[in-house]
Amino acid sequence: MTDVIGPPPPFDPELAAAIAIAGEKMPDIGRMLARGGDAVATARALRDEMADFLLDPDADLTRDGAFTVSEREVSGPDGAPDITLLICRPNNAPPPVGVIYFVHGGGMVVGDRFTGLANFLGVAEELGVAVVSVEYRLAPEHPHPAPVDDCYAGLLWTVEHAEELGVDPARVVIAGGSAGGGLTAATALLAKDRGGPALLGQLLLCPMLDDRNDTYSARQMAGVGLWDQTANQFGWSALLGDAQGGDDVSPYAAPARATDLSGLPPAFIDVGSAETFRDEAVEYASRIWRAGGIAELHVWPGGFHGFSGIVPQAAVSQAAGQAPRAWLRRILAD
Amino acid sequence: MTTTVPSPESDAVRIGPPVPFDPELAAALDVIRERMPATFTAEMLPMFRAARAELPDLTDDEISLGGTFDVIERTVPGPAGAPEVPLLICRPASATVAVPALYFIHGGGMIMGTNRGQGMADVLEVAAELGLAVISVEYRLAPDHPHPAPVEDCYAGLLWTVEHADELGVDPNRLVVSGASAGGGLAAATALLARDRGGPALVGQLLLCPMLDDRNDTYSARQMAGLGVWDISFNQVGWSALLGDAQGGDDVSPYAAPARATDLSGLPPAFIDVGSAETFRDEAVDYASRIWRAGGIAELHVWPGGFHGFVLLAGQAAISQTAKAAVAPWLRRIIGA
């Protein structure tokens, strides 16, 4: 690359202060990746290291009785194992209710159906909608297309069993953050291209969209923040193996590769200005607009990857947390 | 969707399918269309100004928000050799200490508008909420006064404000330049001037659907030709009025068209918003992107299906309410209120 890469945008002062205090608890992905070794062993080490960070075993998924929580084993993709769906139904809303189909994050290599879910239950309670969270197989043990096919299979099952679940199949929003945002975008592409379920919207929070891992922001933020270019390289290589970054990557693996972004459900896209994914998120929104589509974009100043979940008390996190709620209210309004 | 019939000229420049308007905004646009054409030529300017002049400015009572603000009008020295610049100064009546201030630059495509226009209403509302003063500058308009008259007037008023901060009861270290549409472009240009001339340190620049790029040739400008509010033909009239034959050429100053600036480092934190269904979408996104690439601070919001000025022109729509509500939290963080 011949461009001169500028200095990183500074972190928001409140976020920077919180990171300085929480530094010890933050997983040092770069250090773990620097150890080398094979991808499976590294992914397992990451899962161990990040378990405390990503999981909140004390989270009350019923939200003090507001939701009935259950799990179902449902059919996976053809020839693949069943998948687990975690289903949270609001007790105080008469069926059929709208549903947020949630895809967790974790760089394609980490996390489970509980990761980040609690953040969505608050808004789901407020809106009286259900949340269905899918447990998809992780890379590198299960490379593309396993993760996205699992996500899509769970979506199909949800829509086909809408009546049994008490949800309205015409009011489905798919949602996810980070790798979950990328998988959400990919699931929307699959639904479009396979003539699958009509979706009300796609909520893409700091989404991981582009396996080429070579945007200006990826290079600008190299070595800075929670999920830098090196970590991103690990995630995409785990998903795609040697195909990563090459000429033959499916848009269902890396939605930035899609050449046609028309005909998609309305998108909500957000990202921090100080993270790897900034430019690919802005570009994805821009390409939706250029195709005549509907997208809302927010770029939060000084936000590192996942800032609003990691430092929720910061003022910029509060603002960033409100924006998807307002969008969901509009999208899911009767 | 609206019943707009685009002109053949706009069909010729149009690319891609247009972005649909938000359904509530589309309904509002049908009403707007009854008093505003979809496309525009320079010959229509007198008629257009006359029609706009019929839109009432805010009354004294509306400007004081029923006594919330003490309002003073001052005429202050203009740029060297130029006439004086009127400022409308609105200071919270209850303030007992120096307050932060919004230095506000009205919109109107560089060719219309006043510093007491309807665009002030939202500014005064947020200022009242946060306890800010508002100083609204009356700058000279193109084509009667081409570049650099408008931006130099804005800058002169800013300098006077900072130099007289004590007298105004304003904290000179907590000043935000702000504006919508042409006012957003002038606010961005004023921030560039302040940086390059070693002028006042600003704590922020609030750029609402800003008019930044005289080249008037972005994808969004062409995509939305003949549609919405302030399409490519309006924009052409505005920029040509400001720049004459220089418009779109190789020698346009960044203080006229901030998109022409090659260095966007060292600027105050920016808030930039724009609708996804307007001419200015891509230049707003690009300006934010270039600030980030320079290591700067910018917050960007692109509101789906928003036409130009939707917050002002269709304030009751849900999307307008949401867009309007995004400003106060940013201001709070910027000024530490």
Image (tube, coloured by chain):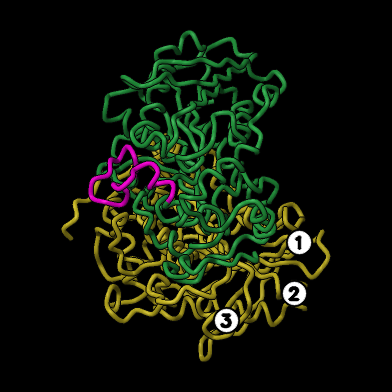
First in residue order: circle 1 vs circle 2: 1
Q: Is residue B7 left or right of residue B147?
A: right
Q: Give the farthest residue toward the left.
A: A2
Please give the name of the residue rendered at 38% of the width and 32% of the height, measured from the top-left corner.
B151
Mark 3 and mark 2 residues within 8 Å of each other at the beta carbon:
no
Sequence-wise, the earlier of marks 3 and 2 is 3
Q: Colour of chain A?
A: yellow
Q: Secondary structure at mark 2?
A: helix
Q: Are marks 3 and 2 on the same chain?
A: yes
Give the color of chain B as drawn: green
User: What's the amino acid at mark 1?
Assistant: Pro
The answer to whether residue B31 is left or right of residue B246 is right
Q: Which residue is mark 2?
A: A165
- The residue pinned by badge 1 equals A90
User: Is label 1 in a helix, a strand or a loop?
Assistant: strand
Q: Nearer the viewer, residue A126 or B257?
A: B257
**Marks 1 and 2 close (CB-CB < 8 Å):** no
Q: Is residue B247 magenta?
A: yes
Looking at the image, which residue is at 60% across and 78% down? A154
Q: Which residue is mark 3?
A: A153
Separation of disc 3 and disc 2 at Cα? Answer: 16 Å
> Label 2: few (<14), some or many (≥20) within 10 Å?
many
State the quadrant of the C terminus of chain B.
top right
Residue at 32 percent of width and 19 percent of height: B81
Instruction: Give me the residue at 46% from left, 47% from top.
Output: B300
> Label 3 lies in what chain?
A
Identify the amino acid type marked 3.
Ala
Query: Which of marks 3 and 1 precedes in the sequence?
Result: 1
Quadrant of the image occupied by residue B243? top left
The residue under label 2 is which amino acid type? Answer: Leu
Looking at the rendering, the stretch of residues picked out in magenta corresponds to B237-258
